[in-house]
Amino acid sequence: MEPRQIISTPAMPTRVAPSEARELTILFADIRGFSRIAEQLDPLALHWYVHRFLTEMTEVILRFRGTVDKYIGDSVMAYWGAPKFDPEQEDQALYAAFAMVAAARALDGEFKVAGHPRLEVSVGVNTGMVQIGHLGPNESGVPTVIGDAVNLAARFQSMAHALDVVILAGARTAKGARSIQCRCLGEVAIRGRQSSALVYEPLGPVAAVSVRSKDFYPCSYPENRFDELRSPLPNLDVPDLRLDL
């Protein structure tokens, strides 16, 4: 495989809003099986359903020092590490992911009482260099982040269900987290990208995870224990997102 080529920024004749390169941790969360749910609910009930979900997810993001970037249908995108530098951004994002899962389960109970479809969530988290700034002609809007690290976070969220996990994280997130134990699941090929990526399942806080489990692998040393993984992963053909960020 030929090495990936990074295309440099060309000269631009028009004025571009200022932006900044930063290493951030990006999170995507959305409702599993949303098309099926939308088919079962009328538009008003569906609006209430998604509103309740996004409200709960937003409260969790803010509680763990994250910033909401945007809502995309039933999905929410958030990031950590800006506008202020956060040395615990990986930990905070993963704690938020765990809290989202807990909040979704509580909300699922509420929906069950109301006779609504079951609610399940998938979360993808990834850390990497991105460009943060304003996009589009109106510079007074809310800044957003863009870059390959953002795309990977979105892809991880999409493939979580296929790997039978709720939260899926990238290598830089798993290695950067100081208080969360992660298990290396292996290397996967990702549709639309030349290079594959290591993926991890966050297990929980260090103190709460037993290291005696044969399925546990310290996230700092995946390469040295690659032959001990549970089983090889399939070459996942993950469909493109509704928006290619």
Image (spheres, grey):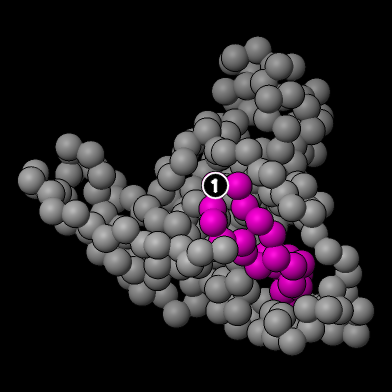
Label 1 element class: loop
Which quadrant is home to the N terminus?
bottom right
Residue at 71% from the left image edge and 80% from the top image edge: 222
| Image position of 2 with respect to 77: above or below | below
Residue at 46% from the left image edge and 63% from the top image edge: 4
Q: Which residues are magenta?
A: 181-205
Q: Is residue 89 left or right of residue 164?
A: left
- Image position, residue 94 (x, y; %): 61, 66
Residue at 88% from the left image edge and 69% from the top image edge: 230
| Image position of 216 with respect to 119: above or below | below
- The reply to whether residue 80 is in sight is no
Magenta: main secondary structure equals strand
Residue at 23% from the left image edge and 39% from the top image edge: 136
Q: Amino acid at mark 1?
A: Gly
- The reply to whether residue 236 is in sight is yes
| Image position of 181 with respect to 81: above or below | below
For the residue pair 221 and 122, the one nearer the viewer reads as: 221
For the residue pair 39 and 188, the one nearer the viewer reads as: 188
Q: Is residue 111 left or right of residue 86?
A: right
Query: How many numbered badges does the structure rendering display?
Result: 1
Read off the residue under disc 1. 192
| Image position of 141 with respect to 50: above or below | below
Can residue 68 be found in the magenta stretch? no
Can residue 186 be found in the magenta stretch? yes
- Image position, residue 58 (x, y; %): 52, 48
